[in-house]
Amino acid sequence: MRIDILTLFPGMYDGFLSESIIKRAIEKKLVDIHIIDFRKYSKDPHHKVDDTPYGGGNGMVLTCQPIFDCIEAIKTDESLVIMMTPDGKPYKQEMAYQLSKKKHIILLCGHYEGFDERIRSIVDLEISIGDYILTGGELPSMVVADSIIRLVDHVIEEGSHINESFNNHLLDYPTYTKPREYKGMKVPEVLLSGDHKKIEEYRKKESFKRTQERRPDLLK
């Protein structure tokens, strides 16, 4: 899989690419990630990428030319262009699974007061990671990229994500590790029983209970 992230602030991705699972996935050549500064595509003498909005208003709006040219330079028939925007479709785990099967994803990060509306004409999908506003699309692009990469074959063990939260519309069951007792809090006896059938039943029950208490909307 190849992921291209279009941004005005490439330095924000230094830690993201050089730590933990993402770093290992890159080293194993399971994913190819490119951070592209679309300012370099600007034809303005001063490499300007934004301008004042028609009709007036606060802030600056990202202009068409640098983004159009950047996307046209890297897009192929296998590319899926995604715009990170609070206007977009709410991001869910199911979408992460779908995107993890794509060969080439382009993530477009906005900044300032947003995009010239005409940029949407070259975008295939718009994604929002929540009903709140950030200073730009860089953090959301990392969230989306991370959630996709970990689902790519061989990045992590398949069993590690099959039973995670949001699969089957349920939150994950509670988990424990050593020691058996800590500050008076004990590990449930069923998890120490060795009876795999009872353990599975316990986990399903606790998963449903937790979902019902914390996210009843998922059960609907």
Image (cartoon, helix red, strand yellow):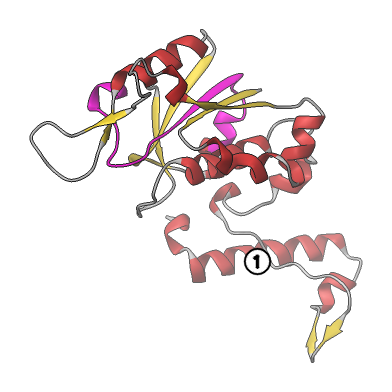
- Residues 88 and 218: in front is 88
Q: Indicate left or right for 170 with 203 as reference.
A: left
- In the foreground, 61 or 201: 61
Q: Hey, what amino acid is under mark 1?
A: Lys
Q: How many marks?
A: 1
Who is closer to the viewer here, 159 or 168?
A: 159
Find disc 1 in the rendering and name its residue.
205
Picture quadrant of residue 44: top left
For the point 80% across and 66% down, which residue is it? Answer: 198
The residue that appears at 47% across and 63% down in the rendered structure is 215
**Residue 98 locus on image (x, y percent):** 55, 30
Residue 200, compared with residue 4, is above or below; it is: below
Horizontal and vertical percent for residue 103? 61, 19
Residue 75: tell me if it is visible: no
Residue 187 picture quarter: bottom right
**Residue, far right:** 194
The answer to whether residue 63 is above or below residue 96 is: above
Kindly tell me whether residue 117 is visible in this rendering: yes
Residue 57, position as x, y percentages in the image: 13, 43
Is 8 above or below relative to 1?
below
Seen in the picture, residue 217 relative to 3 is either above or below; the reply is below
Q: Residue furthest top?
A: 77
109 is within the stretch colored magenta: yes
Q: Residue 142 location, x and y as percent?
A: 56, 42
Whether residue 91 appears in magenta in the rendering, the answer is no
Secondary structure at numbered mark 1:
helix
Q: Nearer the viewer, residue 72 or 124?
A: 72
- Residue numbers of the magenta segment: 96-121
User: Would residue 202 appear left or right of 5 to someone viewing this image?
Assistant: right
Please name the residue shown 59% across and 35% down the image.
97
